[in-house]
Amino acid sequence: VIRDNLPAYYGLSTVAVSPKGDQIVYATYGEEKSGLYVVDVATGTERTLVETGESLSFYPSWSPDGKYIAMYTVYRVENSQANSVYRYDFIPGEDGSFPSGQEITVMTPDGTVLKRFTLEGQYLSQLYWLDGGSGILFLSGPVTFGRWGEVISAEYDSVWIAGLEDGEPLRIAGLEAIEEQMGEDIAYVFPVASLPNGAGALLNVAGAGNGSIWKVSPSA
């Protein structure tokens, strides 16, 4: 046994294995211990990747080369009286948080923050690593919450790529243009593959009818 007694609550408690299988990232959100933790498979030793505090990080994802870990991050709700994870501004889903956050954080396995990607007034969703770990792709859009933290609307409308060596994220597609060509509203969209050398990605896009595959890139 490499690690036992892993938590299984909130729907946020995920386990992600590195591409080489030598490290594991797991999440726990208890009152005494909360955050993301890295376990060395060979030795079983554990170290903290990021602790929960003013922010909460979840759904860790390894880069294809195993050098980095990306995750969604949300921040504490001001004056919240809720307990545990419900103090944070995540979007509730059926079995846990929807894969979307106010920030996408990229770290090295030793806990060093490499990048923090944010867009003012937007939630970032559908995080996807590009070929070779050169960067990430994600969707963005405004999210409106009700009085009790319920989601009134979530309108993801843009596709972005962000390089780990570059500056700001680059908008490479607007979903409204895809909807116009489809002739109907988009029901869901998520990335399914990176283009070679991280030049863009293929998206699975579906409306009320059949789905379709779209290529998105700065040159598309």
Image (cartoon, grey):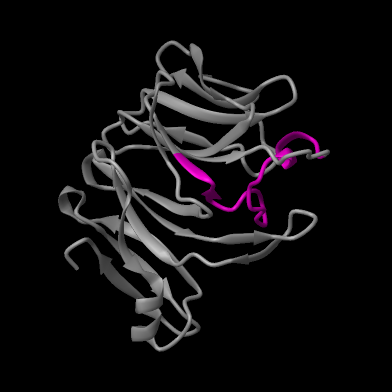
Q: Is residue 58 above or below residue 158?
A: above
- Residue at 45 percent across and 58 percent down: it is 140
Name the main secondary structure of what is drawn in magenta: loop
The percent coordinates of residue 123 (x first, y second) are: 52, 53
Query: Toward which corner of the image does residue 106 lie, by quadrant?
Result: top left
- Residue at 48 percent across and 28 percent down: it is 25
93 falls in the magenta region: yes
8 falls in the magenta region: no
In the foreground, 182 or 166: 166
Query: Toward which corner of the image does residue 176 lie, by quadrant?
Result: bottom left
The residue positioned farthest toward the right in the image shown: 81
In the foreground, 158 or 185: 158
The percent coordinates of residue 109 (x first, y second) are: 39, 23
Q: Quadrant of the C terminus?
A: bottom left
Q: Is residue 106 above or below residue 121?
A: above
Boundaries of the magenta span: 82-104
Kindly tell me whether residue 211 is visible in this rendering: no
Q: How many tags in the picture?
A: 0
The percent coordinates of residue 37 (x first, y second) are: 53, 23
The residue positioned farthest toward the front in the image shown: 120
- Residue at 53 percent across and 51 percent down: it is 100
Residue 198 placement, left or right of 124? left
The percent coordinates of residue 212 (x first, y second) are: 34, 76
Query: Toward which corner of the image does residue 8 lie, by quadrant?
Result: top right
Residue 126 placement, left or right of 162? right
Q: Is residue 209 above or below residue 29?
A: below
Residue 100 placement, left or right of 205? right
Kindly tell me whether residue 83 is visible in this rendering: yes
